[in-house]
Image (tube, rainbow, N blue to C red):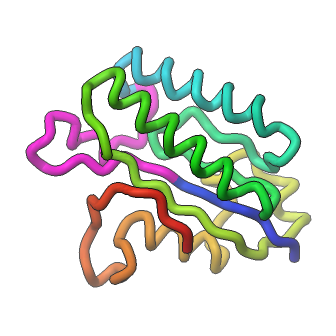
């Protein structure tokens, strides 16, 4: 087992927002072309800037994930969070619509060599913790989905 920094991000638009549907869209090719391009450009920028500390690169998804060396996760998380906020402010005028959760946890080193994206890692304790907090906040699954934006460390 080895420690890694892990993050996931997603949009959290309120129901009355015209972009609410993005909260549930996992199909990148269904996104508006300008948004697809912006997310791809951000992932290229992040993966280039942090190439020395990234283990699994940020992907080009509306729900991006990334794995880093543990000491770098906070800096990378802040950069992705700010980059996604900037994208939505620029394209739609919406601010404060991103929820990013990150943490540090142990994963099997051999397993990490076999996955290409964060979404392929599987159900390890740190992944479950980050995923549950991303979707439900501190109350857990019984509290219902959360649409509270922000940058959260678990």
Picture quarter containing residue 147? bottom left
Find residue 124 and report its horizontal and vertical position in percent.
66, 75
- Indicate whether residue 75 is drawn in magenta: no
Q: Which is nearer the eye, 53 or 111? A: 53
Asked whether, in this view, residue 14 is left or right of residue 73, the answer is left
Q: Which is nearer the eye, 110 or 82? A: 82
Asked whether, in this view, residue 98 is left or right of residue 41, the answer is left
Find residue 15 and report its horizontal and vertical position in percent.
13, 49
Q: Which is nearer the eye, 58 or 119? A: 58
Asked whether, in this view, residue 35 is left or right of residue 124, the answer is left
Judge whether 153 appears above or below 78 on screen: below
- Indicate whether residue 25 is drawn in magenta: yes
The quadrant of the image that shows the C terminus is bottom right
Can residue 24 be seen? Answer: no
The quadrant of the image that shows the N terminus is bottom right
Find residue 47 and report its horizontal and vertical position in percent.
73, 34
Q: Residue at x 68, y 34 (%)?
A: 46
Find residue 81 and report its horizontal and vertical position in percent.
50, 45
- What is the count of numbered marks? 0
Can residue 4 be seen? Answer: yes
């Amino acid at each position: 087992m080895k420690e890694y920094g892990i993050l996931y991000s997603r949009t959290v638009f309120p129901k009355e927002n015209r972009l609410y549907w993005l909260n549930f869209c996992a199909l990148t090719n269904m996104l508006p072309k300008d948004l697809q391009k912006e997310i791809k450009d951000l992932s290229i920028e992040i993966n280039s800037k942090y190439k020395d500390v990234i283990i699994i690169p940020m992907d080009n998804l509306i729900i991006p994930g990334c794995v880093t060396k543990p000491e770098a996760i906070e800096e990378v998380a802040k950069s992705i969070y700010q980059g996604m906020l900037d994208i939505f402010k620029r394209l739609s005028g919406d601010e404060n619509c991103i929820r990013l959760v990150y943490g540090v946890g142990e994963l099997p080193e051999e397993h990490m060599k076999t996955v290409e994206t964060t979404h392929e890692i599987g159900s390890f304790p740190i992944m479950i913790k980050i995923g549950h907090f991303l979707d439900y906040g501190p109350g857990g699954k019984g509290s219902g989905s959360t649409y509270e934006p922000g940058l959260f460390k678990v």
